[in-house]
Amino acid sequence: MLSLSIEGAMSDLESRDPADDLETVDAPLPLIEEEGASQPSPISTTRNNKERIGLILVNLLTALSVVVALLLAADRFLLQDAVKPNPAAAMDSQAEVSPESISSESNSKEAPPEVALSAALPLLDLEAAIGRKAMWHTTIPTRPRTNVITYTVQSGDSLFSIASQFGIKPETVLWGNYETLQNNPHLLKVGQVLNILPVDGTYYQWHEGDRLSQVAEFFNGKEPGLYGMAFRAQRGIYFASGWLTLVYNFGDGFIDQKNWTSRMDQPDVAQSLDYFVKLLNTCPPDVLNYTHEEATSAFVSGKTAMWYDATALVPWLEDPSRSQIVGKIGYTPPPPGPAGDGGVLAGWNMALSADTKNKEAAWAFIVYMTSKANAKTYISYGGVPSRISSLEDPEFQASNPSAEAQLGAFAAADALVQRGLSWIPQTPVVIKALDRVGYYGSSVAAGEMEIAEAMQQAHEEVSAILSEVSE
């Protein structure tokens, strides 16, 4: 709006004839006589003459200024055709650029593209105008490093000097090299090869045979306010859901899926609960109030080093409006346990009512909407990938850093299928049974019951619930 109003004002001025102003200024000022008035005094006449002379002088000075400006413009631009381009002069003018003004990132001897372009344009007579040296300065945006690099300790180095060199804290150098320094800065020696983390934090190098609980314990309390894991563990169904992510790594789960009887009194179930509780001990103190939302929030806020939950929640982790750790997350498939792989395969079901009038049409719609042909569209609108072909799609892999890990999770889930087990036991009373399983499991985690007592009571209640189906 400001530019429009200015242009409008300029147009009004340009439409006026400057001669009109000159005539107005140069015309004799009329002396108005009123009836009965006396002739003007010499003093007033002199004052009027002085005013006229002053206006004439102002007008002459203005005109002179315009003439001078036109002469300078003619000398600056209109006479340039007489000046022939001189490539040598162009190179000389380039040579005058101060090296200090050029980014230290560039070592090229060739002129920047802009300089090369100016050499091809008609040259101006720099001596006829006010000259100014070109000040080339390129601002290169800095991007954070995301990979771990190494540094060999030199004579005279210390944790502080190494940290300062790479822009990290001294404790990050220490925590990033636990195997070498063992949390002892006095073990620093010349020749040691240290890991240099891209950001401040703690580094753990995974080795074959390492347990998940071992890694969680390593990170727990390693930094102020940092915990090892984040799980869903709220009393009841949520605790059972978190426990289910691990129980099949130890055995065949809570329910015998062939005979449909309780397995809560089996040693492998008790062993899996003991392991789960150990992991929960590395979680934030309020973990027993966590659903999947609180667990995910703890992770994306940087409160926990690891998170174990559904692949469907990965978009939350990579959403800058939700997550403070975007671009700093590594993904891995679930690790095997004593009973091998037992990955989670959950989801949402579509079903037709027994009273549906158009069963064939409804079924055709479900098949069409969940078909391979619609998979990419479904995912683009926030759907959860459920096909191997979707996870292997190069476009999806390029946009989703968890793609390879999700393929590994599918393989682990398939191993459970090959064992003849369903992650959610297919019985109509399963929710009721899992609620009691979660109740007794959380009682152990809260220190209210011992494992043996809790498992025996859970076994009795789950057995009673399962018997309702056979009655």
Image: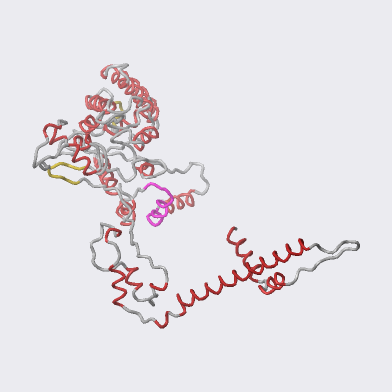
Expressed as whole percent of the image width and height from the top left, the position of residue 376 reads 39, 55
Can residue 49 be seen here? The reply is yes
Taking the view exactly as shown, the residue that stands out farthest to the right is 36
Q: Looking at the image, what colour scheme do you see?
A: secondary structure
The mark tally for this picture is 0
Can residue 254 be seen here? The reply is no
Give the residue drawn at x 73%, y 72%: 27
In the image, 336: left or right of 321? left
Expressed as whole percent of the image width and height from the top left, the position of residue 379 reads 40, 51
Expressed as whole percent of the image width and height from the top left, the position of residue 133 reads 35, 65
Give the residue drawn at x 41%, y 68%: 130
379 magenta-colored: yes
Give the residue drawn at x 50%, y 76%: 71
Q: Which residues are magenta?
A: 371-384
Depth order, front residue of 376/300? 300
In the image, 3: left or right of 369? right
Depth order, front residue of 216/374? 216
Q: Is residue 446 above or below residue 195?
A: above
Residue 155, located in which quarter of the rendered image?
top left
In the image, 169: left or right of 39? left
404 magenta-colored: no
Q: Quadrant of the C terminus?
A: top left
Residue 88, located in which quarter of the rendered image?
bottom left
Depth order, front residue of 95/114? 95
Expressed as whole percent of the image width and height from the top left, the position of residue 380 reads 41, 52
Depth order, front residue of 246/221? 221
Q: Main secondary structure of the magenta part?
A: helix
Q: Quadrant of the N terminus?
A: bottom right
Q: Is residue 411 above or below residue 136?
A: above
